[in-house]
């Protein structure tokens, strides 16, 4: 029996008899006023029976007990909020209230000895800001397990939060952020929010800030150009004083410990997609403890106060993004997918490409050369596939067929007649074009010496088929062979008797043989 619950109920009754209010008892015992009210409704004997019932009855989360225990053993710092999110994400389970999940996780920790390391930090309340006034930006990193292995990978994150509505956006990558990456992330955040605020608050990050000399801020050249182009006010925190950001939103900490911690990494594309799904499902949907409202609801009102931004590109042609080619021969950009030629993806090898955004178009290049693989219009919305018809299997087959045709044409001297013949074959035998080409290749192999003559005969007689070409070539070759044999025989006879001279005889000798006389 859990005597702590019985003892608590006894204390509640004791303090109530002393004349303390429910609120006072709540503060003295560190419990909620609703718990005080519930305990006062129980008599001591009822309290004992109630506690015994608690220990024996089945709990709503018992079907997930082993799963939750595995999560806690694997990641002891896992929060109850993460357990709630994972139950929703992996099992679509939303029947248990957050308080129920917190109690269940706490009980499992106590029963199975899985302590959670807690860290504390002192904060100071600051006034609320009006809608559309400020975005706060912060950076962070976290190390997580890769795939189903125990190897670990470090991921880098930049987080944005609207100070009024607490509406959040986060972007991840596998390498440290460069200034170009930061600028790109700003554009993605503005696109996610549907606009920008009047000012943006930053820590003193070397990607953007060169130095701060008694309030005079020196930006890096690239970031200065970006600020001038987008025309927002920059507020930089004082060194070693992140609380000068004003609101203590700790967006990076929130994303790291409620989304990333304990999650397995497979690819940066799927990780980013999971993060945005989590923001929609939890990060921006669940009620914020400070404002007691859901960020998505407050954001709906704040959105109209944001400053719209132009569609002109921020990255120049020399500034690009590196992307991984997915196994379906696509790349992901801003939650949309764009095709690359089939065969670009290589199994068991990570294929990287260079992506350039310019004039509302997305161009894809080979990473180690300037060879362009694809060019697409930028898609609007999310989850859309933009596919070039030339990137599919049919396009690959057509390309190989054209290469086959070019190879066959190279054997003809009269390219014009050969092209006419091939084009007619395309029209008459579209489904059997490869078979037609193979027959022509046998003609080239066996009767190449009469190839052009056979082609000419076929065109004159309107015989457009590789089989006709083969038959005509065979007949021409047979005739040529016979002609050659006749010529050879004639030449041989003349050479054999060329040295023999006929004897010249007089007329008298022939008359004597015939028995006549000369008159």
Image: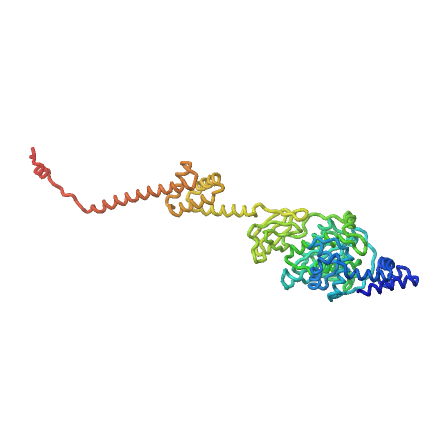
Where residue 60 sits, quadrant-wise, is bottom right
Depth order, front residue of 57/376: 57
385 left or right of 164 in image: left
Residue 329 lies, in percent from the top left, at: 58, 51
Res 206 visible: no
Residue 229 lies, in percent from the top left, at: 71, 51
Res 189 visible: yes
Image mark count: 0
Residue drawn at (18%, 46%) of the image: 500
262 left or right of 40 in image: left
Where residue 435 sits, quadrant-wise, is top left
Depth order, front residue of 105/496: 105
331 left or right of 282 in image: left
Which corner quadrant holds the N terminus?
bottom right
Where residue 253 sits, quadrant-wise, is bottom right
Q: How is the image coloured?
A: rainbow
Residue drawn at (47%, 47%) of the image: 404
Residue drawn at (21%, 47%) of the image: 496
Please say if 271 is above or below 469: below
In the rendered image, the residue lying farthest to the top is 519
Which corner quadrant holds the C terminus?
top left
Residue 251 lies, in percent from the top left, at: 75, 58
In the rendered image, the residue lying farthest to the right is 19
């Amino acid at each position: 029996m859990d005597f702590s619950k019985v003892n608590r109920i006894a204390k509640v009754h004791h303090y109530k008899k002393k004349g303390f209010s429910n609120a006072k008892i709540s503060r003295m015992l560190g419990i909620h006023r609703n718990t005080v009210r519930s305990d006062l409704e129980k008599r001591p004997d009822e309290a004992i029976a109630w506690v015994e019932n608690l220990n024996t009855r089945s709990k709503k989360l018992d079907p997930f007990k082993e799963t939750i225990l595995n999560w806690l053993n694997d990641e002891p710092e896992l929060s109850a909020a993460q357990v709630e999110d994972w139950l929703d994400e992996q099992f679509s389970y939303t029947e248990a209230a957050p308080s129920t999940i917190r109690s269940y996780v706490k009980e499992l920790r106590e029963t199975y000895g899985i302590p959670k390391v807690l860290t504390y930090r002192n904060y100071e309340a600051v006034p609320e800001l009006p809608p559309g006034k400020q975005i706060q930006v912060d950076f962070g990193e976290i190390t997580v397990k890769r795939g189903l292995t125990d190897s670990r990978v470090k991921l880098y994150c930049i987080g944005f939060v609207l100070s009024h509505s607490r509406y959040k956006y986060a972007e991840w990558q596998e390498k440290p952020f460069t200034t170009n990456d930061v600028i790109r992330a700003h554009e993605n955040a503005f696109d996610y929010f549907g606009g920008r605020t009047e000012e943006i608050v930053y820590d003193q990050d070397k990607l953007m800030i060169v130095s701060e000399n008694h309030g005079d801020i020196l930006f890096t050249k690239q970031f200065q150009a970006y600020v001038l182009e987008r025309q927002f006010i920059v507020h930089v925190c004082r060194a070693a004083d992140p609380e000068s950001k004003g609101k203590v939103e700790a967006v990076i900490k929130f994303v790291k410990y409620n989304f990333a911690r304990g999650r397995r990494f497979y690819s940066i594309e799927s990780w980013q997609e999971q993060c945005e799904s989590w923001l929609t499902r939890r990060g921006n949907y669940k009620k914020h403890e400070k404002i007691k409202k859901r960020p998505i609801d407050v954001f709906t009102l704040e959105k109209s106060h944001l400053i719209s931004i132009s569609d002109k590109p921020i990255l120049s042609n020399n500034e690009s993004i590196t992307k991984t080619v997915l196994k379906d021969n696509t790349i992901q950009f801003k939650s949309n997918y764009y095709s690359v030629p089939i065969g670009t993806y290589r199994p068991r090898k990570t294929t990287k490409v260079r992506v350039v955004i310019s004039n509302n178009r997305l161009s894809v290049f080979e990473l180690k050369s300037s060879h362009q693989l694809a060019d697409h219009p930028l898609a609007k919305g999310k989850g859309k596939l933009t596919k070039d018809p030339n990137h599919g299997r049919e396009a690959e087959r057509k390309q190989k067929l054209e290469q086959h045709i070019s190879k066959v044409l190279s054997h003809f001297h009269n390219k014009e007649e050969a092209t006419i013949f091939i084009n007619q074959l395309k029209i008459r035998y579209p489904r059997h074009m490869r078979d037609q080409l193979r027959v022509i290749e046998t003609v080239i192999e066996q009767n190449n010496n009469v190839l052009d003559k056979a082609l000419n005969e076929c065109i004159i007689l309107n015989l457009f088929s590789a089989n006709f070409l083969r038959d005509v070539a065979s007949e021409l070759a047979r005739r040529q062979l016979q002609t050659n044999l006749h010529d050879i025989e004639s030449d041989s006879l003349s050479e054999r008797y060329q040295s023999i001279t006929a004897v010249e005889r007089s007329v008298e000798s022939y008359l004597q043989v015939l028995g006549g006389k000369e008159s």
